[in-house]
Amino acid sequence: MKLPIFIADAFTARAFRGNPAAVCLLENELDEDMHQKIAREMNLSETAFIRKLHPTDNFAQSSCFGLRWFTPASEVPLCGHATLASAAVLFHKIKNMNSTLTFVTLSGELRARRAEDGIVLDLPLYPAHPQTAIGNTLVQDICYSPDTQKLLVRLSDVYNRSFLENLKVNTENLLQVENTGKVKGLILTLKGEPGGQTQAFDFYSRYFAPWVGVAEDPVTAFQCSHRGGELGISLRPDGRVDIRGGAAVVLEGTLTA
């Protein structure tokens, strides 16, 4: 079995930055365990699988597809950067003619539309609930989203971007500290700084998900990871969120499975 596969760097206009994701196009149904085997082989934070919803669908002409995401360890219900990478592959490499694509996923229908400065994702906005802070690091707020099983920690405004960039996080310790199964991802975020001689951002962040096999995800806002990356985020009145970003397809090939 030979499958078209791509790697795209999401939330960046340049190759070898941003958040890389593998994207696999499925002409036919794939054995269930093969999804995980391929994701483990690709060994990126996420591998996306785009499938036709009907046998007569065409990757270059259809506007609606199925979409699933797998880390090297497990399937996840939602992944923004792999969705952006999937849309970029369909728009830029497959030359899909539509202005908007719809993906049927475990998180409902997600949309990706063309924009002058990239691709805009239409994603669900999940509520988060305040939590109690513990430990020595100064914390402004802590929130938990039971829908996504994500814990967000906003560090105190006394810290700056350099502190977040240089913060050492032992992800093995995270697995020992949180082993209840309630948390699948940890977001550390910090209020942005005035632009000065550099571009201003509303906030910086880092994201850790060792519970699903991802030590650190490269991009989730302006990302203070080694690779870096940028997102444009707009909250909508209908309870959803638009996330804008670019993507560069850096590899195209055929996977023999």
Image (spheres, rainbow, N blue to C red):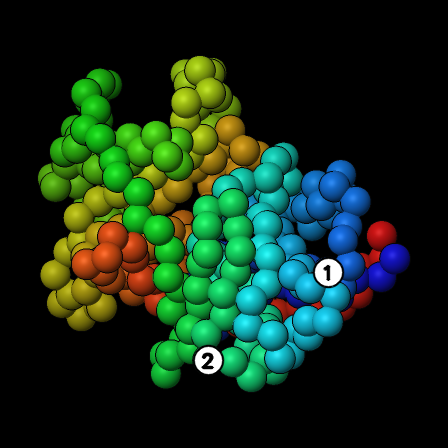
Q: Position of residue 190 (x, y in %)?
A: 21, 44
Q: What SS does tag 1 mark?
A: strand
Q: Residue at x 35, y 51 (%)?
A: 124
Q: Is residue 153 visible?
A: no
Quarter of the figure with residue 113: bottom left
Of residues 115 and 7, the one nearer the viewer is: 115
Which label sits on residue 185?
none
Crowd band around label 1 with a 10 angstrom C-alpha radius: few (<14), some (14–19), many (20+): some
Q: What SS does tag 2 mark?
A: loop
Which circle's residue, 1 or 2, is located before the other in the chain? 1
Crowd band around label 2 with a 10 angstrom C-alpha radius: few (<14), some (14–19), many (20+): few
Quarter of the figure with residue 234: bottom left
Q: Is residue 196 visible?
A: yes
Asked if 84 appears above or below 40 in the picture, the reply is below
Asked if 114 appears above or below 81 in the picture, the reply is below
Q: Position of residue 80 (x, y in %)?
A: 45, 54
Horizontal arrangement in the rendering, residue 203 relative to residue 220 (left or right): left
Residue at far right of view: 1
Q: Position of residue 105 (x, y in %)?
A: 53, 51
Where does the N terminus fall, quadrant-wise?
A: bottom right
Residue kind at label 1, given as amino acid type? Leu
Q: Residue at x 44, y 68 (%)?
A: 112
Judging by the rendered image, the residue that carries numbered circle 2 is 99
Q: Position of residue 197 (x, y in %)?
A: 18, 70
Judging by the rendered image, the residue that carries numbered circle 1 is 26
Q: Residue at x 23, y 57 (%)?
A: 238
Residue kind at label 2, given as amino acid type? Ser
